[in-house]
Amino acid sequence: QPDRVSGPGRGPSRVDLSVVIPAYNEAEAIGPVIVALCGHLEQVESLRGRFEVLVVDDGSSDDTARIASGVNPFVKLVRHPHNIGNGAAIKTGIRNAQGRVIVFMDADAQHDPVMVQRLYEGCADYDMVVGARGRGSQAGVHRSLANGVFNQLASYVTGRPVPDLTSGFRAIRRGVARRFAGLLPNGFSYPTTITLCLLRGGFSVDYQPITAAKRVGKSKISPAADGAKFLLVIAKICMLFSPLKIFLPVSLYLFLMGLGYYGYTFYTAHRFTNMSMLLFTTAVIIFMMGLLAEQIALMRFERTEAE
């Protein structure tokens, strides 16, 4: 058992909402975040006594765990013995959550606790509700541009508009979250993975506009390293659910290259070259591999549905 669960032993007898807060060295912000969150939820009549807050301490070296466990008697603290990653903390939260709906929010005070109720209520009609940040909520021009690229790629892969692919503030039905928990990476790209999984799997996803405040403390995301990981995750999920989205453009590109080269050699030398034949043949092979991968992905998904 890689994590330890602790708490004061008090909690609701029936849980409708579980709020999962992954935290790594967030001693500066975690206390006020929990106070504001619990204070708001206790005022919501439909949730009073029917919610739980799970703080997943991902091997913090500061006082994050001590502060989180002492702020509110209804907070359940789940601890990793060492730092594994934000996605791993999310998976631990999913495994330990008891609520019908799970809301994920950051521990750095960026997310407004008042929005938790709206995201939760949205899950009455949708499988997942994402808090979509506007341009004013992006942390810097470089982050805004990178997120714009990721959103466009995700829209291409899923065939649906994706306003905010990387938002960590979202609500999801527990059964759906547990279904895809095994596909989530241990790093920071879990929002990317779970969004693409649900959209390609035919689940309903809604986006609610939010305003993210400036975080307390220093960000732990590296734009260069984690940006490359996000792109790789998009490619992996595309191969998992819709391989033709990758194979078809590559095949078409090679076919057009072969056609263009054949036109050039026919005009200059009046002959059909081996290079043109190689490009045409490669294009056909890649297209057929894409069809085969698409069938395998479909069978895998049908097997998952049956389970």
Image (cartoon, rainbow, N blue to C red):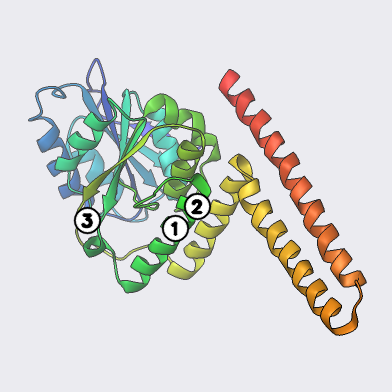
Identify residue type, mark 3.
Ala
Name the front one of labels 3 and 2: 2
**Is residue 236 found left or right of 22 in the rendered image?**
right
Identify residue type, mark 2.
Tyr
In the rendered image, which residue does mark 1 sit on?
152
**Is residue 248 found left or right of 105 in the rendered image?**
right
Q: Quadrant of residue 219?
A: bottom left
Tell me, for residue 32, which label it has, or none: none
Do the numbered discs 1 and 2 sit on residues whose CB atoms are within 8 Å?
Answer: yes
Q: Nearer the viewer, residue 178 or 165?
A: 165
Quadrant the C terminus occupies: top right
Identify residue type, mark 1.
Gln
Whichever of callouts 1 and 3 sits on the residue coming sooner in the sequence is 1
In the rendered image, the vertical position of residue 86 relative to residue 2, given as above or below: below
Q: Residues within 10 Å of mark 1 (few under 14, many from 20)?
A: some
> Residue 120 at what x, y percent from top left?
24, 32
Q: Nearer the viewer, residue 263 or 8?
A: 263
> Residue 76 at what x, y percent from top left?
29, 32
Q: Which secondary structure lies at badge 1? A: helix
In the rendered image, the vertical position of residue 112 relative to residue 179, given as above or below: below
Q: Which secondary structure lies at badge 3? A: loop
Q: How many marks?
A: 3
Residue drawn at x 47%, y 52% is: 154
Q: CA distance from mark 3 to mark 2?
A: 26 Å
Q: Residues within 10 Å of mark 2 (few under 14, many from 20)?
A: some
**Is residue 176 found left or right of 77 in the rendered image?**
right
Residue drawn at x 33%, y 56% is: 25
Tell me, for residue 156, which label it has, or none: 2
**Is residue 306 found left or right of 47 in the rendered image?**
right
In the rendered image, which residue does mark 3 sit on?
212
Q: CA distance from mark 1 to mark 3?
A: 21 Å
